[in-house]
Structures are given as C-alpha cells and as structure tokens.
Amino acid sequence: MDIYKKQHSKGKLHAYERIEMLVDEDSFLEIGNDIKNTNKGISIEEKIPYDGVITGFGCISGNKVFIYAQDFAVMGGTLGENHGKKIVNLMKLALKEEKPIIGILDSGGARIQEGAFALSQYGKVFNYNVKASGKIPQISIIVGPCAGGAVYSPALTDFVFIVDNIGKMFLTGAEVTNKALGTNYDKSTYGNSEYVSKRSGVAHFRYCNEEQCYINVKKLIIFLSNKKFENNLPFRTWNFNLPSSSRRVYDMKLLIEQIVDRNSFIEVKKEFALNAITGFALIKGIRIGMVANQPYAKAGILDCDASDKIAEFVRFCDSFSIPIITLVDVPGFMPGEAEEAKGIIRHGAKIVYAYSESSVLKITIVIRKAYGGAYIAMGSKSLGTDYVFAWENAEIAVMGAKEAVSILYKKELNSLNDIEREKYYKDKAIEYQKLLVDIDNAAKWGLVDAVIKPEQTNKYIFRCLSQRENETSEMFKHALNPL
C-alpha cells in the first residue's frame, strides 16, 4: 500500500503496523474507522480516511488496553475536529473500563484547514488526560513530530516513550525560535530523543528503534496490570560490599540488582538526573517501586532535577498502590546559588509532599549516610514511612561529625596551636560521632526500626511486603499533576 511505503521511506512503521507490534495476535478491534473529517473551516475535497487516527482496543499478554495511533501518511496525522473526538471517545471508554490507554503520536499538529475547531479538540484531549490521571495508566509513544500544543497531551500522561531519529518533542521548533530570538539552535538536535531524555527529562524511556520501544512498552503494561508474579526462587547469594571509605563512590544499581528479582528492574528516566534512581521491580514476585540515591553521580546529592524525578515517581506508585522501597545514601541537598536560583526549596518540597501524602506501604533502608534535610525528605520515619531500617555503621545526622565540629567549635579551634587543635578536633569529632551520628542512637530514639546486617536486607524487605500483600487499596487517591 502507498501509505505503508510512505512511512517506510522515512524509516518509520505505519500506524497499523505499530498497533500490530504492540498487541497480541488478532486481538485488536478498531472502532470509528468510518469516521471522516468535518467540513468546518477550509473545505478539503477528498474525505480523510478515519480522519488520520486509528482507534480501538486489544490485549497485551491478555491484558486489555485501549490504543490510538496517529497516521502521518494520512494528512500528516494532523488533528482535526473528528480526529480529536475519536481520541476523547477512546479515553472515555478506557476510563469506564479502568484499562490503560496508549497513544502513538506521529502528527504534524493541529490541522490548519480546521483552525480553532482543531485547537478546541486538543483542549478536550488535555481535559481527559487530567480526568484519567491517577485512575488509569496513560502511556505516550513518540514516533514522529510532536510540537506546539500537541506536546501537552504526552506531558500530562504517566510515561513518555520516544524513539531515536524519528521522535521529536518541542513547544517551538528550532527555525521559529532562531528567527524570533536570533539564536542558532541546530534543527537536527533541538527537541530530539536524546534532548528530551537527558536534558529536559520530558521522556521517561528512549530506544534506538520502534521494535525495541514496543517490546518495552509491553513489558511495562504487563508489570502495571499484574498485582503478583510467580517467583518461588530463593534470594540471590549476597554479593555486595560497600567501599571501605565512606567518601568513595559506588554504583547503587549493583545493590538494587542484588535485592530485586533477576532481570525485573525497569528503570524510569535513567538518562535524566543521574544522581537519583527510580524504577519498577519485583521482589519474590511482588511489585515494588524503587527509589535510590546514586553515589556514582554527584555523590547522590539531591538537586532540583533529582527532586522532581523522585517526587513524580513516588506519587505514581502511591496512586496505583505499588509499595515504595527507598535506598538512602545522601549527603544533603545541593548547595549554591545556581540551585537556589532554580528553586531547590520548591523542588525539594515536592519530595517531602510526595512521601507525606502517600498511603501505600513504604520501606526505607539507610545504606551509608542520611544527612540534613535530605535525610528527612528521602522517606524518613517522620514523613510517615512504615518501616525504616539501617545498615550497620550507617549515619543519620544534620551533617558529618568532622563538618559539625568545624562549625560548633570554630572559636575554640582558632585559639589553639596546630598540635592542640588537631587533638581537640579529633576528640570532639569522636564525641559528636558517638552522641549524634552513630546509628545505634537513632535506633534507640525510634528513628529507625532496626539496625540490620547488609545480607539481611532482602529478608526484611520481603517480610514487610508479604505481610501487607493482600490488603485492599483505595480505588482512587489523587491525580498526577506534572512535576
């Protein structure tokens, strides 16, 4: 067919092929195929097949999903009045049946010939994105241009997948921006898949081709659709050691792999805010959301982007009743004028709000250190976390002992000679460490529920999870406003 060749010539699949790659064989039922474009606005002589968007439902590994796919080969996949109405109708059906909805976006934007009639339909799509928020999973797949007002629909959905070379997202294109502002942005990289995955954080997942993208969309749908997965395998043999020095970096992902079921970790926004890790996984077949600091990047410190990333993920898990496991190794919030100017106070407050608001089961493990306000924000007991455990030799404090002594005893230290100063500093650091930093004191004060050996981590997490596994959850908690 010509429309297939038209897409293939651009290195893209056709809308029907994309749907077929997503759903189980012979499970897709198209609805609204006979709907054509309206005659409002400038007349279009030939009627547009299905008004440029294919809508219907099918199954992914037996789990029902609703799907719409914009067809760039038909009128550039532009959104007209009936095009928008078809999407909204599908969203209403998905909401009624409480099933996920997947949008495959490949469109030139609003149909110019229909003017405001097309624009008003974008508004209705956005409206139903918000109505569906927190009630059903919403997934957007960007496999073509997504520009102007059109980008707000995927921005309102829970997860954005994008494909290299063909997917683009921007509010204003490079050409218009350069002309208006006198800039010289590169058209080939402005708003491309790497840009929105690494720099802006708009996209949650990026893949090299469409096939890999759809494989991973299916993996996520299967995870979100099942409360429990079979896994009778024993925990892995413990094989993780922290560096001997508390100042040395390590890869937190190696610890996560040690805790969760093999090959079950689905990392979310893995290219954005590398100092924080978020993702889904299984522990003995039980679904969990995983949040962690990443010492390997910026020492795991919390900055504006990491704060947004964590808060967004925590709120999703809470809304869909997925227990949250938090692994803490955080030196604090990022200091400095740059982060203050970006609003680190506002952004950091989002984590505090997300953890405090959530009613899902929360388990926190303090791995090495939890300092200052970042200790509070990262799923502390005071924010309502159900269980907080800490590894032996972990530290909870306003700051490290050496830093604290330098501030508390500055006057005394300055009055001493070098030899006296060194001894005084060392003695006070030991005293401060014993009184206010050692984890045993935190346990005595009820800040942690137990001090555990590292190799006991899996057992403690699993026992807490399994005891709450059969509890019923609220039908609807809250919408997921963009963070």
Image: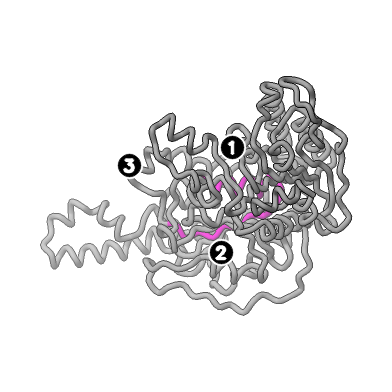
To which residue does mark 2 refer?
450
Q: How far is the residue under mark 2 from the one under mark 1?
A: 51 Å
What number is the disc on residue 111? Answer: none
Q: Are marks 2 and 1 in contact (CB under 8 Å)?
A: no
Residue mark closest to the camera, 3 vs 2 = 3
Q: Residues within 10 Å of mark 3 (few under 14, many from 20)?
A: few
What number is the disc on residue 147? Answer: 1
Q: Are marks 3 and 2 in contact (CB under 8 Å)?
A: no
Q: Residue furthest left?
A: 417
Indicate the amino acid at tag 2. Answer: Ala
Along the line of sight, which residue is nearer the eye, 421 or 123? 123
Instruction: Using the rendered view, name the quadrant where residue 82 is placed.
Output: top right
**Image quadrant where one finds the C terminus:** top right
Looking at the rendered structure, the secondary structure element under dot 2 is: strand
Looking at the rendered structure, the secondary structure element under dot 1 is: strand
Q: Is residue 355 visible?
A: no
Mark toward the start of the polypeptide (1 vs 3): 1
Query: Is residue 318 covered in magenta?
Result: yes
Indicate the amino acid at tag 1. Answer: Ala
Q: Position of residue 251 (x, y in %)?
A: 48, 67
Q: Residue at x 77, y 61 (%)?
A: 228
To which residue does mark 3 refer?
337
Instruction: Using the rendered view, name the quadrant where residue 323 is placed.
Output: bottom right
Looking at the rendered structure, the secondary structure element under dot 3 is: helix
Q: Report the magenta residues as a range.
A: 308-330
Q: Are marks 1 and 3 in contact (CB under 8 Å)?
A: no
Q: Residue at x 54, y 48 (%)?
A: 192
**Color encoding of the figure:** one colour
